Amino acid sequence: MVAMMKKRGWSLVHQKEIAPNKLANDEIASMAHLMRRAGFGDPRRDLDVRVSQGYEEVVEELLHPEDQPAINDELLYRIFPGYEGALGPPINQAEWVYRMINTKRPLEEKMALFWHQLFATSNSKVDNPPEITRQIAMFRRFGLGKYRDLLMELAKSPAMIFWLDNHGNHDGATNENWGRELLELFSLGVGNYTEDDIQEAARAFTGWTIAPKIPRNPLGRFYWEFEYKPEDHDEREKTFLGHTGNLNGEDIVDIIVEQPATARFLARHLYRFFVADEPPVPNWNITPPNDPDAIDALVAAYNDSGGDIASILRVLFNADFFKGSRFAKVKSPAELIIGTVRISGGYYGFRPGLNNLALECGWQGQELLNPPSVESWHTGQAWLDVGTLLRRVNFAARTLGDTSLPGVRTIIEGIREQGNLSPGEVVAACLDAVGPLEVGEETHAELMVNAEKNGRLAWSTPGEVNASEKTLGKILTLIAASKDYQFA
Amino acid sequence: MASTNKDPVLVVLELTGANDYLNTIVPYADPVYWDNRPKVYIPKDQLLPIDNELAFRSDVEPFKQIYDNGNMAIIHGIGFENSPRSHFRAMDIWHTCEPDSIGINGWLGKVIRDLDPVGENVLKGVNFGQGLPRALTMRGVPVTSVNHLASYGVLSSLPGASEEDRSQLLESFAKMYAPAIGTGPVMDYLGQTGRDALRGADMIKVAPERYSSNIKYENNAIGRSLRDVAQVHLAGLGTQVFYTSYGPFDTHFNQPGSHTKLWMDISKAISDFFADLREHDAGEEVVMMLFSEFGRRVRDNGTGTDHGAAGVAFAIGDRVNGGMYGSYPSLKPEDLSQGDLAPNYDFRGFYSTLVDRWLGLDPVSVVGGKFEQMAFV
């Protein structure tokens, strides 16, 4: 962690002022980091419980979502009755946002987002939000299992078949779209196959299509279903990555998951999503990873486990390279929004406003269920431009600075219980309450300036309470607006 | 450089997803077109002939009107050698002018740098849309990216904050994002971006207030984007590069319906945009260019078209010398490149023309070399 902070050029000096049982508590900071990355962040009060559970045990709990209660689908359906028949994405996006905020299975939900980002399927073309929602549900079910099984499910996902046109991929008239992106973007990466391999993979997937659709009725629509049509499958010999035979789609997936390039490609994706920002994906065949040893460790975990995602993540979350990567990643819009809402409260359970949270993701550049292309979102620093930064700052500031929200009330009450804190203690307490968050000198200095305006907090008279709460609201607003808050 | 009293303005419209050249400018007199497009063709009764060989499609009547008025240059056969069929790689090449390596800096980032070398005006380049396209990305060059023009501003909607509170908080924000020494490239970028957001928001908020127009744009994404471009341009904030995109043009499947809809939207929006400018006597101040990452395969795949190579670009504006430039690539099988139209005009020549003759800048450093220009502006 010290190394990471030095790389970012942060001074550790001001941390000495912080109460030793709080921010300086490395265990709390580690747990906060784990929950930000493997989930959508935990409110500060939940971290103490997690720490007492033990880090490795928490990792195991995350890797076994089946041991935790699932979201009640029937209840959800009653609250979002439109999400199966929605004509536009917002209801389905809101349904997902609800899950991200309320899930007891944070890693399952985070993996659904990871796979959505990797297997980017967009409503702009599919034009069927319930189908994409069903693909996301498939990611929840298979997202921590074997990569092979996931790719097989993906190849049969009606939304994916439609998105990459495999329903137009016929014996004698191939459509290469799925074959190409399967190799380029979903498994091997550029430079690890030939144009011929693409054509052969496309031929092997002929006949993998969608069953005739039942037309939409006025009250809703019917789900699409996968169908394999043997009469439309190209039965002639194919040669794919050196394997020759009458290959079918399963064979292509089986060959792909055995390729060293696939293990590496997946390792780099997992590293980029969970550990630290990396160069953009299209550069990977010419740009080495920032931490080759970490990638090697993840590749080894892939090989040792037969491509088992949970096994790779077990290695990842317990590795020093992960633990040392605090704040080395720019938050994605979903991470920023859900993480902020989980701290501020106000959206637990069924609340109005979920649609706006979903739209906000889009306004910050990450429209859920509608990635810009099959290449997906550009991440890391690319999340930040003048327009998106402004939206991120405005959203987080008006949410964490809203002293009427229940989570913010909890923060204020917790600080009030600590008595008449000095300005330095106020800043430390606020940073602890929203993270713990580590900040650079310039941010800390400006927080101090604002904390010092009213001196020590005081809580004896209504006027003092009002002034103290206003000070805390301002400090929280500025923390949420800071550069430091942009990092996960 | 065109002689105009005001600074020249370039509006870039990206047709995302690879627009089908053959069904945009239809080589209707060529039997090879009809042979190769048994399913995905523009029917003969839906053609608007330009001459004896080429035609627009009838659903882009307003677009053709611009051509007929002499304000549209059609640039044939545009692309580059060894065209990759990958959207992302091809788009990167168009955005960075780096066909042989991975480019980091966008060509328009360089244009903005050369138009405003000290980064004086954060609105010199404005993007409308989600996220900044790579074409506009260049370290040290501020570009404003606007999603919704009407609600743009830093810390603009804090609950219960008075004007005084907000101005204090904005002062703190400015200090937190002030340049700091030795904090690393990401923090530097973030600080710069925050400062640019603050400056740009202060300036751009006047645009919707100052604007009024009789033009009714369609309420679709391209209509809204071009209306926003018109508002910011007409506010006189010094913006010289606007960027926006429309799509998706990746019509592998069921192309006829979706391609028609896209072009109807574009045709109407561009026609409205220039009518709006003319209503404000600003028609001569703007040149718009349209491009797509590549064209689509000559032979259709039954319901759509796969990835191709050569495409078509357009330059539009009252200062444009309308007409056709270059030549339509041959459709004959022996002339194709892996089944695709072979590009015969390097896109960097198109850029060079705009950079040199319209914006009055040295094109060599922008596009990375000397390329053949055309006399369309």
Image (cartoon, grey):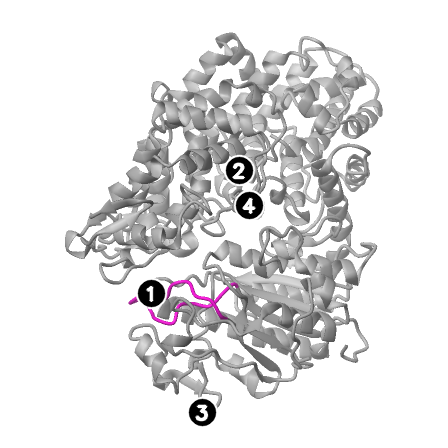
Q: Secondary structure at mark 1?
A: loop
Cα separation between marks 4 and 2: 25 Å
Mark 4 vs mark 3, foreground winner is: 4
Is residue B300 on the magenta stretch?
yes
Which subunit holds the residue at mark 1?
A: B
- Provide the residue designation for mark 1: B254
Which subunit holds the residue at mark 3?
A: B
**From what the image shows, is residue A408 above or below residue A183?**
above
Is residue B41 on the magenta stretch?
no
Cα separation between marks 1 and 3: 29 Å
- Provide the residue designation for mark 3: B52
Highlighted range, magenta: B293-310
**From what the image shows, is residue B5 above or below residue A375?**
below
The kind of residue tagged 3 is Asn
- Provide the residue designation for mark 4: A283
Of the pair A349 and A165, the residue shown nearer to us: A165
Q: Are marks 2 and 3 on the same chain?
A: no
**How many C-alpha atoms fall within 10 Å of the one at disc 3: few (<14), some, or many (≥20)?**
few
The kind of residue tagged 4 is Asn
User: Looking at the picture, how far across and down is residue A346, in whole percent?
Assistant: 54, 30
**Which label belongs to residue A334?**
2
